[in-house]
């Protein structure tokens, strides 16, 4: 008796618009089957789709399992071959939902004396700058206001 194939939710990130598509897929599915399913969601013909995961271009004649997919830890990027041509029109504008980021509370400043204290204060400042840079990068430098709650909203 054949065992039913387990299907897993898999995320596909569309490179030209930033959209996210989610599909229930099986490791036994061929890449061409996945492309057919993506065509219904993305309106990109399977022959125009390029799927990349890690350093691999996913080939139509291989199975998803050949690439150890599906995996929640490994994003798959969907590219539209037509958008990569020299005279290609710009992709349609996509309105993405609002972004709400929680800034972690600032940790107390280290009070130790001497060289250890200096190193701890340097590490503290470095971590604070790193967290701030992550938020700025995530929001694409479009921070409009910070709320007292620690939330940042962008327009």
Image (cartoon, grey):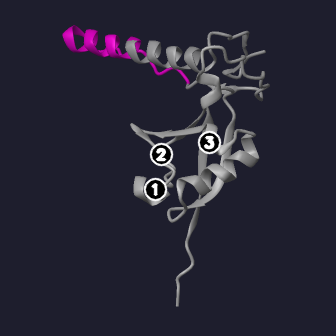
Closest to the observer, 59 or 71 = 59
- Is 51 one of the magenta-colored residues? no
User: Where residue 118 appears, x then y in whole percent?
Assistant: 27, 9
Q: Magenta residues?
A: 105-125
**Disc 1: CA contacts within 10 A as few (<14), some (14-19) or many (>=20):** some
The residue under label 2 is 58
User: Where residue 154 appears, x then y in whole percent?
Assistant: 74, 16
User: Where residue 128 appears, x then y in whole percent?
Assistant: 46, 15
Q: Earlier in the sequence, mark 2 or mark 3?
A: 3
Q: Nearer the viewer, mark 2 or mark 3?
A: 3
The residue under label 1 is 62
Kindly indicate the quadrant of the structure image that contains residue 47.
Answer: top right
Q: Looking at the image, which residue is at 41% across and 18% down?
A: 127
Q: CA distance from mark 1 to mark 2?
A: 7 Å
- Is 119 one of the magenta-colored residues? yes
Q: Looking at the image, is 1 positioned above or below residue 143?
A: below
Q: CA distance from mark 3 to mark 1?
A: 15 Å
Q: Decide: marks 1, 2 in contact (CB < 8 A)?
A: yes
Kindly indicate the quadrant of the structure image that contains residue 101.
Answer: top right
**Disc 2: CA contacts within 10 A as few (<14), some (14-19) or many (>=20):** many
The residue under label 3 is 47
Total number of numbered labels? Answer: 3
As drawn, the residue found furthest toward the bottom would be: 1
Q: Looking at the image, which residue is at 60% across and 30% down?
A: 81
Q: Decide: marks 3, 1 in contact (CB < 8 A)?
A: no
């Amino acid at each position: 008796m054949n065992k039913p194939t387990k299907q897993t939710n898999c995320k596909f990130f569309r490179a030209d618009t930033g959209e996210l598509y989610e599909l229930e897929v099986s490791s036994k599915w061929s890449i061409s089957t996945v492309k057919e399913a993506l065509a219904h969601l993305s309106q990109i013909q399977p022959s125009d789709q390029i799927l990349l995961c890690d350093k691999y271009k996913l080939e139509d004649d291989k199975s998803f399992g050949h690439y150890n997919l599906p995996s929640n830890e490994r994003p798959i990027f969907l590219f539209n071959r037509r958008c990569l041509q020299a005279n290609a029109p710009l992709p349609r504008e996509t309105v993405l939902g609002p972004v709400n980021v929680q800034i972690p509370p600032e940790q107390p400043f280290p009070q130790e004396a001497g060289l250890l204290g200096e190193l701890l204060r340097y590490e503290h400042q470095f971590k604070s700058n790193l967290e701030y840079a992550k938020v700025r990068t995530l929001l694409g430098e479009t921070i409009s206001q910070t709320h007292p709650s620690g939330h940042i909203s962008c327009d």
